[in-house]
Every structure is written in C-alpha cells, then in structure tokens.
Image (cartoon, grey):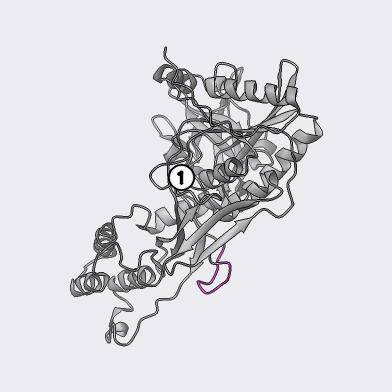
Amino acid sequence: MNRISPRSPLFHLALFSGAILATTTVSLLGSGLDRAHAALQDSPKAIIDEAWQIVNREYVDGTFNKTNWQTIRQELLSKNYTSKEQAYAALKAALERLNDPYTRFMTPKQFEALTNQTSGELSGVGIRLEVNEKTKILTVVEPIENSPAIKAGILSGDRILSIDGKSTKGMTVEDASNLIRGAVGSKVNLEIGRDGKEGFVISLTRARIELPTVRYSLKQEGKSRIGYIRLSEFSSHAADQMRRAIKELTAQKVDGFVLDLRGNPGGLLQSSIEISRMWLDKGGIVKTVDRMGKDEKIVANQTALTRLPLVVLVDGNSASSSEILTGALKDNRRATVVGSQTFGKALVQSVHSLSDGSGLAVTIAHYYTPNGTDISHKGITPDVKIDLTEGDRQKLTANPKLLATKDDPQYARALSILEKAAMAKTVPISTSQQVSTRQE
C-alpha cells in the first residue's frame, strides 16, 4: 500500500472510481473543537471524529455542499454508540448529507478489498474462476502468468471440486476466492477435476500475485496488422503493463493501435498520467482544481513510445481515469475516439486509512480536460459516436470472444478508421463525425 503524508507534494495523487491511493492521516483536533478528546480514544466516537476531521480539512467544497459541517460533528459526538457498527452507520449517514457519492466510508473489509484492487496485487494462488453456466461447477477460466497455479500445472477448464476439503458445490466465486486467498507463504489444497482423469489434489503455496489489467494481441485484419490493447483498470501496475504491451506490439510491426477502454471504471490518477505520456509527446493531459481554487496542470514530457495511428474505444462505463486519458488524446488530436458517451466523473478523491483499519474516500479536487472542458455529469462525446443496440450487447455478453472482432460494431468502425489512416499515412485526428445509433 502506498502511504503518502497529506502534506507531501505528491498528495495530489489520488483515486478515481473504485481505485485507491491510501494516505496516512492523523486526527488533528483543535482545542476549541473538543476538550474531551482523551475520552474519545477508546470509544467508537474516535473513528467518527477522525473521519470528520479529514473531511473538514480536505473536502473540495468549503461550504460542504451548503451543510453545517460543525453542527453535524456536534450531532455525531452527542450520541452514544454501543458498537463500532452503530458508529459506522452514523458516519455513513452524515457523509450522505454532503450529497457526494464519491465521499464515502469503508468498513475494514471494504477498505482491504479496495486496497488490494488498486495495488493490482493479491495474496493467493493466481487463478480466475467462474461458475460454469451449464454445469454449475466452479471452473478455472485461466491461471495467471507466473503464479503458483500455473507453475503447478492447473489448466483452463479445470474444475475446483473442493478447497481444503470443503466441497465447492453451490459455492459462489466470491466465497471460493475468500477461501483460496490467504497469507503469503501459507498453503491451500485444491481438489481438481479434469476430463480424462480422476480427481486429484494439488497443494499450493500462496504468493503475492500481480493481476493483469492490460491484455493485448496482434490482430491481422486483412492487409493491416493491428495492435489491440484492452485496459480494464488503472492499477499501480497498469503503466508497466501498458508499456510492455506497446513495446512488444511495436516490435511486431503493427500498422496502428486500438486502445479499448470500454467498461474501465478508472483507477489511480498517476497511472492515467503515465499512460497518457506513452501516447503523447507534447500537450496537456489534465488540470485539477482544489478547494482553494489552486490549479495544477499536468503535461506530456516527450516520452511517447509510438506515433502510430490510434483509435480509442469507450462506452458509458468508461469513467474517471479512463476519461482523463481519453480527454487528453482527443483534445490533443492524437487519437480518434469511437463508441458511446463516457460516464462523466470529473472529481478526484484521496483515500485515507483510519486507525481501526476502516477507510475514508474524500473528494479533494475537480478536473478538466486539456481544452478546459468540464465533463462532470456529461462525459466525453466520441468523435465517431456508435451506440450498441440491445441486440449487440446481448450477443457480445453471451459470447465475449466476439469482442474486438468484426462482429463488434465499435471495433469494426475502429478498423475502418485505421485503414483510412494507413492509406493516408497520417495519425487519425478528431473528425467530430456523428453517426446514428445502429438499429437491428
């Protein structure tokens, strides 16, 4: 977990959507605010006041969305709580009064889950699981590269029959994952079912696993060699994985790239900045503005890895860091953006660990695209707008292998744009072309 002091010049590194950058915080209680601070130390009120102080110090709106934040504190501390759960519920209710869904409290379990998600790592054996739609049996989708599972010979399609002797019949993926994960160095026994073999048990030693957030492939589309990259989340490892993808595909002599950000909910701000710089040599990336009106402009720094033609795919679930990257590429005319209107989240959060292991996400800034556009609640309009029909969505959901094929209308349009760019031997630019929604 990254830990950065709130006074650090790096404090602007922040969180979008479900992704987090944790900060070390100390409850700073002014003598005029609470003379009974010592009495709070061992009570559920301590967490309430710790969280209140962080919001009071950092929330992006100094009016607290026109709520009396001081009065809310008095109300919270005037109540008696018999458990932490009661205190948690009161704190959640108080934060809801800010009318900001991104400023939120997390229980220790929720905070741990988000920390693992953003770190791009977990402690386990390295397998992706699903409950097979036909057999209803817990099944391995794929083992993760360089994981204990792949080293032990676990294969895609293997059935997990039991975990440490506990049958997986009727077990959800979440329940199974909770059993399989554990401390690094500890062991877990998986009973495996495999076609043509009797059930057998594999003992695995849990390790720290780097989760893949970037998947890429070379696609031969007619006469064109296309480097297809899908980024699912801006985790702490996403930039390194993206760098590797761009370099390996470039070495394979691709003619252009498709960067797929559809369904990407966001992640770390720093990750979106680093990835933007891999595609942009110059120009602005994003501008953030804090509660004092102070703005910070982030720009490219002559470190682009490629100048080949680029198309970016987006949809209504492309949010936050996805929109920062998309906005930077679109405003600088580095890529053509294809797909549906993006989500429209233009707020920056920092996430703090609280003293009992719980967590708090606080909105600390607003961001704008390089051209100064505020996308809040509006999103980014693609250069080529193509909305999938319900039939398209059902087909692609039922058969994910059709994604990024000519049966995927948004990807198919990307190919036609890259084909024209290859003929012109220029980087595609924003066309502001609008096309009607496809009909069945």
Q: Which residue is mark 1?
A: 178
Image quarter where the C terminus lies is: top left
Query: Which residue is the extreme one toward the top?
Result: 440
267 relative position to 35: left or right: right
Q: Main secondary structure of the magenta part?
A: loop
In percent of width and height, residue 434 lies at 49, 26
In percent of width and height, residue 118 lies at 53, 51
Residue 285 belongs to magenta span? no
167 relative position to 80: left or right: right
In percent of width and height, residue 168 lies at 44, 33
Image quarter where the N terminus lies is: bottom right
Q: Is residue 134 visible?
A: no
The residue located at (65%, 39%) in the rendering is 334
**Above/below status of 254 relative to 297:** above
The quadrant in which residue 255 appears is top right
- Mark 1 residue element: helix
Magenta residues? 1-10
- How packed mark 1 is, by other alpha carbons closer than 10 Å (few <14, some 14-19, many 20 or more), is few
The residue lying toward the viewer, choosing from 286 and 135, is 286
The residue lying toward the viewer, choosing from 401 and 253, is 253
- The amino acid at mark 1 is Asn
